[in-house]
Amino acid sequence: MGGASSTISTDTFILDSGEVYLTKDETNDIAGESFDENTWESFSKDLHGRVAFSDLIDECRIVSPSSEAALLEQREKIQWLARISSPGSSGALGSAPTKLLGDRDIILAAIANNPRALEYASPELKNCKDVVLAAAKQSGACLTFASRGLMKDKVFLSEVRQTLADQYEDLPSGEKEQMELASHGIDGYRYYGSLNAALINGAVLLVRASYLISISEAGKRLEPRSELPPDAFYGGPIWEGGGRGVIVVAVSYMHQTAEHPDPDAVHLNDVVTFLHFLRRSRDGYEICVYWDWASTFLQIPSKPPLDSVQPLSIAARDQVAFWFTHPNILTLQNKVTPPARQKGWDMSAWPLFEECLSMLLKKQENIVDLQTFLAWRRSESVEEWRKSDYSQFSAACTSGPRILPLAPMSFRQQIGDGSNKNERHLAGGLVDAELLRAQYKEMIAKTTKKIEILRLNNMGASSAAWYNPLVIAGVRVGFVSSFLELCSSLVTLDLSRNKELVMSIVDLLRTCPATLKSLQLSITGVHGDGTKAPWDRVPNLSLMDLQGTKIKGTKVELEGAFMATARSESKGFEGGLKKGERGGDGFGVAVKKCAVWPGMDAEEINFQESTLDAKELNYFVFEVMPSCKRLETLILSNNPALKEDIVSIVNALPASIKRIYLSNTSVFGKAPSPEMGKLKKLCVLDLRRTQVVTGSVEEFESVLATGQKCALVL
């Protein structure tokens, strides 16, 4: 009998019963020379001239009974090929017979519809280059299903990198621009297409973490790229999926000298400590490093420039901004000032450039202060198991003071003209200054229109860095004054836990884009009358958190002020209910509503189990809370950082307070105290698991107003 067909014709027809109908050509492909024209004519056919597969099997019993089993297998294959190749098919193979999972045609057809079908392939096919490459062309994450042996094949890995790069380069121009700095692809995994494309021309090479670790352990220093062996570099694809993949770390640091940035391997040894941790805590990942000295051809003053590498050197300089901006690259900042450097990190232009770019699209956990990490690792108060856990590291070492994003003109003003006189250090002078300005301006133009989420909580920035209404040398400075208005697609703005952010809610809203849906301002210095703020500037707002601020307006008043602007936007239409129903106008236009957590006029403030530190809690309790004249319920439970005398807290409470919850805090002192006598509406006081020394119920009642009842929870 003939061999199996590897192609399903569009004429192939399968009934719901599973019966297969074949065209003449398909029948000949299956039966081969055993069937002639007369045999074909003898078959019964449907209206479209197709033959039932069962008739073909019956014929085989006559011609060659031993072929029946092979034909039955062939029918099963045809049925599965038709099923997984049909429009709308997910390519799922979970219920396919095991023998078909080793069939190349079946697996390739399924991959064409869904690259994750590679997961079901036999071990032999998972080790087959063309099969794995077919899946990787659609999603690099599918490399997680490739065999371990194949993932060690350098030639194959190079082919995959090229494939993923080509996939990105072949995108339509608009989509390509959109995906250049995208964090995730349509497959739901992190997107690395542009990273693979950036590595193709060889201007930048990524150094293997294993190589850096080996030279550090051998007591050597890191030499320039031109002197490194080929196996120092990673030549495969950047990808991630299923707990495997590649992590790229970009090192930001200060050069010690122009001849060698790290002659004594101080930076190297510190970086290697972090790489050791990363390898242990992210098992299954290849760790690669972008380190300018080793990844690019930097010019060494004592050596003449090589014409052969000059184009690569120039191309690499043009890409610096990309490597520190991409959201899926971890920025590792080593803020140590090398010996003989007169200006430190805060006065060095290249670190400023790299830090400002890192702030644009990266999540907070992708910006790591190396010295903070090292101190955490050395700390005896940190349990050993935590020191090998990535989530523990992330929580402990990726927060803290950071620089706010700068608008291009503010950045230009910060780095000066490159003269290095009372300005940030720039080894290349004016040439470097012009390069940084141009790259920064270009990257800001690319990124700000894409930013949908800005989480700038607990930044530790100064008031002037946040907002400055003055125009200095023709330039508006401050994040709110100059940068925020550039973010034209912003959906979520989280500025909470920044008490240094002092400005009116009116001025803040004037700079917010109309796309904004979530505004989080808790524990900030934002103030003013929220009922008179220009909420029409943010018509899509669905959440505003103003807790712990001095913004006026009750929940009802703020909701009313926002809804009034929503009604004006919808030309007075009141709601989507049917005409005649309460609150409906019959026009079917729904009034937009916004969830509100009010500020100083709140009746309830809930900071239970918050992330606030001691300074932030004290700021709220002693500077904001006394102004909350309507406050009835205060919930501060599960905040061990709250370490204040109960008497001090009572003195700061407004007379309107009815319920106080302080359980699981570090509040101390003695209760009752005479000061509690002013809280004439107090009816609940929760002091469970605090350090407060409490008296009897009778003692409490003795300091309260006559007839006042208070539930004391101890």
Image (cartoon, rainbow, N blue to C red):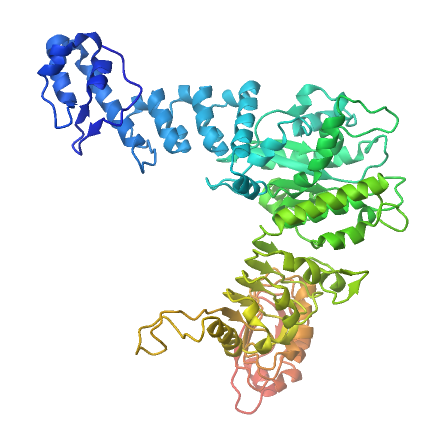
Taking the spot 72% from the left edge, 27% from the top edge, the residue there is: 312
Foreground residue, 711 or 321? Answer: 321
Query: In this image, 667 relative to 574: left or right?
Result: right
In the rendered view, would you say 654 is above or below 669? below
Q: Position of residue 335 (x, y in %)?
A: 77, 44
Foreground residue, 456 or 242? Answer: 456
- How many labels sit on residues? 0
Q: Position of residue 635 (x, y in %)?
A: 55, 70
Picture quadrant of residue 57: top left
Foreground residue, 697 or 512? Answer: 512
Q: Position of residue 680 (x, y in %)?
A: 58, 87
Residue extending furthest bottom?
A: 706
Check the picture and name the quadrant holding the N terminus.
Answer: top left
Check the picture and name the quadrant holding the C terminus.
Answer: bottom right
Query: In this image, 662 relative to 430: left or right?
Result: left
Query: In this image, 575 relative to 685: left or right?
Result: left
In the rendered view, would you say 62 is above or below 186? above
Can I make out residue 523 in this image?
A: no
In the rendered view, would you say 290 is above or below 389? above
In the rendered view, would you say 694 is above or below 144? below
Can I make out residue 151 in this image?
A: yes
Picture quadrant of residue 233: top right
Picture quadrant of residue 470: bottom right
Q: Position of residue 563 (x, y in %)?
A: 48, 74
